[in-house]
Image (cartoon, grey):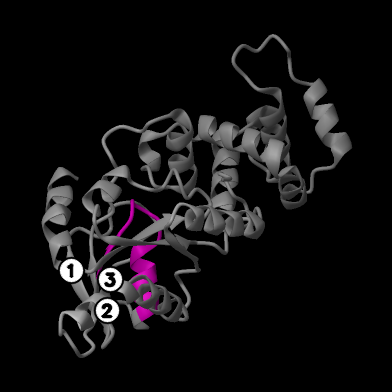
Amino acid sequence: MTKAKRKMESDVKLVDMVVELVDARAPIATRNPDIRRIAKGKQILILLNKSDLADDSVTKKWIDYFRSEGAMAVALDGRKRDSIEQVKKASQKLLAAKRERDLKRGITGERAIKAMICGIPNVGKSTFINSMLGKASAKTGNKPGVTKGNQWINVNDELLMLDTPGVLWPKFDDEHTAECLAFIGSVNDDIINLEELANELLYYLYNNYRANVFDRYQISEDEFEKALLGIDDGILGVKKEPLALLNLISVKRGALKKGAQYDYAKAAKFVIDDFRSGRLGRISLERP
């Protein structure tokens, strides 16, 4: 990651602007502070990708928030071909002032906008690029670290993009950021306790999107209340609400071991997969 960051610091001199992809479900947690430092002095376009998975009303507030901060932001679903038009229009608007300065200096004629496209692992960068080109030019995958090196991509006569690997920063500022990155899959699942992660996710969903969970797993209020009563208050360090939900999900999804014991590992995977795929509905993890 250090090597990739140094390459970005060198290559940013070659571009007109920086396009930063973030996950619309967690726009602050998925913004790499190193990218903002590297892009200092350049125009930045923030793309809230995977907006089809995020709470639409919250995403609109995020766009207003970034605009109030003086930044250009666009919400999109990077899998759709019409993304190119949204990005092209936003890029032209962002660089209008530069075009005007070029004309005053006697630099005439249209040339392609050169943009460096950045983003942390698993925010959908490669899928977004493939959609813009209408073909599989960049490798895609559902786990971090697919793009290994920088590569120029000729989108069309008006837009030239420099793709870069997804890079995380060395130390997360707080636990919330770390949790959001783990929830969306930007941190490798192999180094995470998925049962603990599912419990934290369910606790957030219980407090913010309870109806989504109840609808997805066909849980009634009565079932939930009974499940709560069945949990011992003496269990240290365990939040009752997510544990009750995980118990019910284990039963509803048949995640049971011999002797009707809950298979928490299996149930946890159901919850995390359902959230990441959007089967739990449109959910945002952060609000302005």
What is the quadrant of the C terminus in the image? top right
What is the quadrant of the N terminus in the image? top left
Q: What residue type is labelled 3?
A: Ala
* Range of magenta residues: 115-132
Q: Are marks 2 and 3 in contact (CB under 8 Å)?
A: no
Which image quadrant for residue 8?
A: bottom left
Residue 35 magenta-drawn? Answer: no
Callout 2: SS: helix
Tag of residue 151 = 1
Earlier-in-chain disc, 2 versus 3: 2
Residue linked to disc 2: 99
Q: Are marks 2 and 1 in contact (CB under 8 Å)?
A: no
Where residue 82 appears, as percent x and y from the top left, is 47, 81
Q: Are marks 3 and 1 in contact (CB under 8 Å)?
A: yes
Q: Which amino acid does label 2 sit on?
A: Arg
Task: Name the outermost residue toward the right.
Answer: 222
Residue linked to disc 3: 138
Which image quadrant for residue 261?
A: top right
Residue 261 seen in the figure: yes
How far apart marks 2 and 1 lie (CA) works out to: 25 Å
Rendered residue at 65%/53% (across/down): 280
